[in-house]
Amino acid sequence: MSFADSLPVFRDRAAAAGLSEEIRTSLDGAGLNTLSKFAFASSYVPGAGDDAEFVKTVKTVLGRDPTLGELASFRKLLHESYSLVTQEMKQQLERSEDVQTRKLTQPERADLYERQVKRITGLTLRGPLEPSDGLVDLFCAMYEANRLRFVPWEKYTAKEAEIDKEVRTEHLFAVDSSGKLKVEGKKPDPIADTSTEILLQYALQRRGLSMDQANLLEFKTHQLWVDRVLKVRLQAPPAGYTRTSFRQVLEADKKLFEELANATRHGVQATVNGRPLDLVFEDCMNKPEVVHLLQPLMGKSTEYKKRSLLQTDLVHI
């Protein structure tokens, strides 16, 4: 969801503009609960001469004449709303591959996290299970772009790793938009450790939680895949075969997202029928193209024995 269409962002900006809790409740009751809706609540355009139409709208919402202070707060919120909405429209029209990912605001992050904690029971969404802000931003950007892509495992970081203050800042040379060379201080991005089964489980669960927060996929649906790959990884292979490797799990994971992307070519944003990824996820994870990548591979000794028997058969022929 975009910045201008976010409910928690509107509540935060309305409070910052000086509107009381009672007035914010009245706005919500009138259906004016986002910046985009408030920007076009009347026919008045900020910068035009007479704002009588806007004042009339304010009276309708309050059911009375606003005080001078309240009207000033309403005007401040209107100018901010209109500026942000027009800026977002401009970015959509001029969108290119170089557009940077929009970072969620703190009210948005808090609202998404709190609602998720209420919905998902049985897990403590803190510590190694709480996804980093950067990871949530990545999947929210996918939702806004309406297109799914695979995110490498090393980016499935936890929030506790993101706020580590011991990471040293690296100074790098960069060229700005005017062509001038400048020095930038940048902390290296944290890397998620997926070297063991439990660490891989945490990483994939953080991905599922991030996709859930971004309204892409229900966490419980994503967990079906996590349970499968861990079961395959931990179970003993048949005699003569090797255990499914982390590399195989990674390739199967990539293939799953490839199939999901193919099945959601029309977009991944929620519709009246639900979230597209929720509707196709189980079918994609059960496709032979995905499942066969998780099968145990033949051990070297068994393969050598089969080759020897084949050569013996050819000699007798």
Image: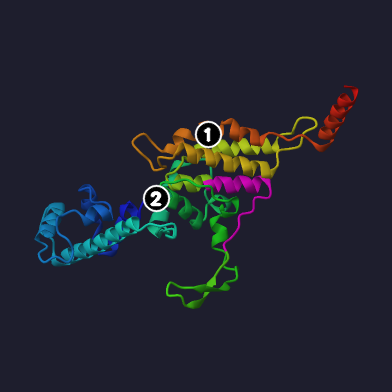
Magenta range: 189-207
Residue at image coords 39%, 52%: 111
Depth order, front residue of 63/314: 314
Determine the CA span between mark 2 and mark 1.
23 Å
Q: Amino acid at mark 2?
A: Glu
Would you name the residue on which mark 1 appears? 284
- Give me the disc on residue 144: 2
Task: Answer with the quarter of the image where residue 204 lies.
Answer: top right
Residue at image coords 58%, 60%: 190
Q: Say if 244 sits above or below 199 in the image.
A: above
Task: Answer with the quarter of the image where residue 298 lies.
Answer: top right
Depth order, front residue of 195/119: 195
* Secondary structure found at label 2: helix
Residue 286 in picture, x, y percent from top left: 56, 31
Left or right: residue 41 compared with residue 129? left
* Secondary structure found at label 1: helix
